[in-house]
Image (cartoon, rainbow, N blue to C red):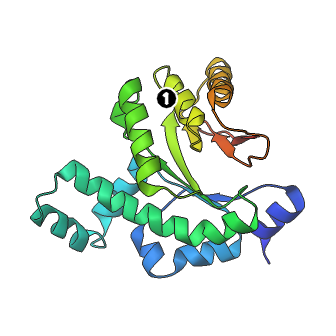
């Protein structure tokens, strides 16, 4: 047991790793981080861009996709979802052992959709339903256009990680979007252990549990 385990066991904090790349999946590094006490992983397009550009780990899959006529944009998402699925499998035991409180992996919708409500909603729903794992977070930007997408995703029962929060006012609006989504959910939430993560640049993540 080390400091990360102590952080969780003694202080009730869940350490997350803000990085993901295929080499860590293939060589066991990600497993070792989980063994050290990491309880979640977040990713974003910049992380994947650096991982794809800086190594040859993705070349075989990317080449096969291009030869099959897959567009560059769709090929990128195939690379991303492959890594996300691998990370989800590695974190799944943490998720199960914590009764669904920890063990999540976060994937972000395309940044170009930050001011497009319909596009964000469609992309977030596609990621959630395509990957379809209980420990997946779909990351949605906390822009004005992102608020309705947050409500819709919550109302459909999907777990959401809201990012890019830069004001107290917007934070309050995200909370309202979250609560509105809960109210619109058609099912019984009394026994649900679904958690949602809200974070802003340079701040401590805030969690709300249902």
Does any portion of residue 104 appear in the rendered image? Answer: yes
Q: Circle 1 sits on which residue?
A: 149
Residue 203 appears in which quarter of the rendering?
Answer: top right
Q: Quadrant of the C terminus?
A: top right
Q: Is 182 rendered above or below residue 133?
A: above
Give percent across and percent down for residue 5.
Answer: 78, 69
Give percent across and percent down for residue 73.
Answer: 23, 48
- Which residue shows up at 54% across the image and 70% down it? 89
**Residue, far front:** 187
Give the structural element (helix, strand or loop) at label 1.
helix
Crowding at dot 1, Cα within 10 Å, few <14 / some 14-19 / many 20+, comes out as: many
Answer left or right for 82 relative to 94.
left
Please tell me how many numbered marks the rendered image carries: 1
- Which residue shows up at 39% across the image and 48% down it? 45
- Which residue shows up at 14% across the image and 62% down it? 66
Q: Is 47 rendered above or below residue 190?
A: below
Q: Is 113 rendered above or below residue 81?
A: above
Q: Quadrant of the N terminus?
A: bottom right
Answer left or right for 89 relative to 208.
left
Residue 35 appears in which quarter of the rendering?
Answer: bottom right
Answer left or right for 99 relative to 26.
right
Give 45 or 119, whichever is nearer the viewer.
119
Give 54 or 156, whichever is nearer the viewer.
156
Give percent across and percent down for residue 188.
Answer: 72, 39
Does any portion of residue 38 appear in the rendered image? Answer: no
Residue 110 appears in which quarter of the rendering?
Answer: top left
Give 96 or 4, whichever is nearer the viewer.
96
Answer left or right for 122 relative to 203.
left
């Amino acid at each position: 047991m080390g400091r990360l385990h102590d952080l969780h066991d003694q202080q009730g904090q869940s350490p997350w790793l803000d990085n993901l790349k295929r080499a860590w999946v293939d060589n066991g590094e990600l497993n070792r981080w989980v063994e050290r006490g990491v309880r979640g992983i977040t990713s974003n397009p910049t992380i994947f861009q650096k991982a794809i550009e800086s190594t040859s780990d993705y070349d075989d899959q990317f080449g096969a996709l291009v030869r099959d006529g897959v567009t560059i944009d769709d090929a990128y998402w195939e690379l991303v979802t492959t890594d996300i699925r691998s990370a989800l499998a590695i974190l799944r035991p943490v998720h199960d052992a914590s009764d669904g409180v920890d063990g999540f992996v976060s994937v972000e919708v395309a940044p170009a959709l930050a001011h497009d409500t319909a596009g964000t909603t469609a992309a977030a729903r596609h990621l959630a339903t395509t990957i379809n794992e209980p420990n997946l977070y779909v990351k949605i930007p906390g822009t004005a256009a992102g608020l309705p997408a947050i409500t819709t995703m919550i109302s459909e029962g999907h777990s959401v990680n809201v990012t890019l929060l830069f004001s107290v006012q917007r934070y309050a609006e995200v909370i309202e979007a979250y609560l509105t989504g809960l109210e619109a959910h058609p099912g019984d939430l009394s026994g649900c252990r679904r958690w949602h993560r809200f974070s802003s640049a340079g701040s401590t993540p805030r969690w709300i549990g249902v």
